[in-house]
Amino acid sequence: MATVAGAFPFAFDFNPATTALIVIDMQRDFVEPGGFGETLGNDVSLLQAIVPTTAALLNLCRANQMTIIHTRECHKPDLSDLPDAKRNRGAPSLRIGDPGPMGRILIAGEPGAEIIPELAPQPGEIVIDKPGKGAFYATDLSGLLSERKITSLIFAGVTTEVCVQTTMREANDRGFDSLLVEDATESYFPEFKAATLCMIRAQGGIVGWTTRFDDLAEALND
């Protein structure tokens, strides 16, 4: 067992052998200039800032032989899994499925939907394509975790208040203990990230725990 003494709202205990790291949607369309995130008017440099810590987190969990899972938010080329309620939100210069600088926006197999090279999955790591915000919706994530007898989850990725928090709430409803690494997650809106961290750990950890990377590394390197 390992204990993250510096976690909030209190220490987080977990067994690395039954813990998975889930890195949410670190895709070119969200993180790189010219992608979907930027077409929505966002400053993608905010998301780029967490890449070094997220890379260190991946290496830490790999070194401890933990299950590694990457997610990509993307849709089928025929858009059959994309409801109008999602496609028509906001007023971006490009919508999901439209041709963009990195191929069709958030379409499976297109360059923009791929995970950024700095965080590329290694052979044997799981990659889940998800059509929704939560990684459990319309995917086989539950079955994959059950097969590996996973009981705890560590989270990183983007954005904190949307896909990361949604997946953590889904995980909580399914009985998983979840820890979000604060400096390996980010939002286009810093105030949204701050509010989400508070929501996750409120009321005794109603959704889960949060911690800094260094505190997790200390727990795993003891």
Image (tube, rainbow, N blue to C red):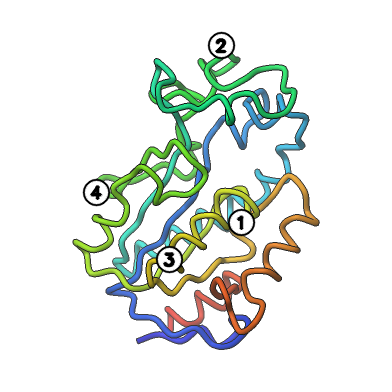
Closer to viewer: mark 2 or mark 4: 2
The residue labelled by disc 1 is 185
Residue 114, image x and y in percent? 45, 31
Check disc 4 and report its element: helix, strand or loop: loop
Q: How far apart in space, not on screen, are marks 1 and 3 (Cα)?
A: 16 Å
The residue labelled by disc 3 is 60
Q: Residue at x 31, y 61 (%)?
A: 67
N-term mark: 2 or 4: 2
Instruction: Report the amino acid beneath label 1.
Output: Thr
Q: Residue at x 43, y 74 (%)?
A: 177
Graded by Cα atoms within 10 Å as few (under 14), some (14 to 19) or many (20 or more), the crowding at tag 1 reads many
Closer to viewer: mark 1 or mark 2: 2
Whether residue 78 is situated above or below residue 140 in the rendered picture: above
Q: Are marks 2 and 4 in contact (CB under 8 Å)?
A: no
Q: Are marks 4 and 1 in contact (CB under 8 Å)?
A: no
Residue 120, image x and y in percent? 42, 41
Quadrant showing the N terminus:
bottom left
Graded by Cα atoms within 10 Å as few (under 14), some (14 to 19) or many (20 or more), the crowding at tag 2 reads some
Residue 183, image x and y in percent? 64, 62
The residue labelled by disc 2 is 99
Check disc 3 and report its element: helix, strand or loop: helix
